[in-house]
Amino acid sequence: MDITKIKFFDTETKMIIESNISRSRVFREMLNVTPPPGFSDISAKPNHYRYKPIMPTGKKDSNDVELYDGDIVEFNYSMFRGDEYDNKIRCKVVYNAEEAMYCIDPIEPHNDAINVPLFGLKDEITKIGSIYLTK
């Protein structure tokens, strides 16, 4: 995994932190190390519980967009199953600790939809949002 792709969600400002300087400050804050002075979108007041890491999955969607933990995707369930009709399901990308892999988990109830591993699903999924940016 490329550590430079990690993002953080600021639970107070409801913003996703992506800049290198800001990520560096978040890491320091999580380790309770005083950050150096300078401009940043991170508060200088230590509070490591304020930030939630958003991990990259290492996978991309049908539009070649990098997928992260917490992304909302549209899953073409029919394409996955080989059905003729068009059946798309909204899912979120989650880490399944029991199976030690990233999966997509249906958000909306569906009669036979299951937690599906991300392996080989590039053509069947399209990123449409993130749980962190949903109001």
Image (cartoon, rainbow, N blue to C red):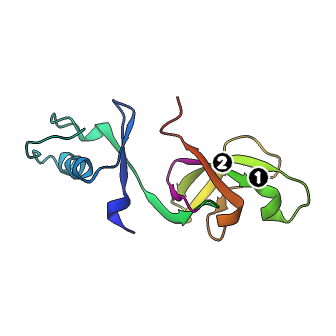
Q: Quadrant of the N terminus?
A: bottom left
Q: Where is residue 65 in the image (x, y as percent from the top left)?
A: 54, 58
- 39 versus 67 height, above or below: above
- Secondary structure type for disc 2: strand
Which of the pair 41/3 is nearer the observer? 41
Q: Estimate the spatial distance between the alpha carbons at disc 2 and disc 1, rounded to whole Å.
A: 10 Å
Q: Where is residue 8 in the image (x, y as percent from the top left)?
A: 35, 46
> Disc 2 vs disc 1: Cβ atoms closer than 8 Å?
yes
**Of callouts 2 and 1, the N-terminal one:** 2
- Secondary structure type for disc 1: loop
User: Where, by quadrant of the figure, is residue 124 drawn?
Assistant: bottom right
User: Which residue is depicted at the point 85% across and 66% down?
Assistant: 82
Q: Position of residue 111 (x, y in %)?
A: 83, 47
- Residue receiving disc 1: 113
Amino acid type, mark 1: Ala
Which portion, as a residue range, is magenta?
A: 64-72
Q: Which residue lies furthest to the right in this view?
A: 84
Query: Which label belongs to residue 91?
Result: 2
- 92 versus 2 height, above or below: above
Which of the pair 70/124 is nearer the observer? 124
User: Which residue is depicted at the point 42% across and 56% down?
Assistant: 55
Closer to viewer: mark 2 or mark 1: 2
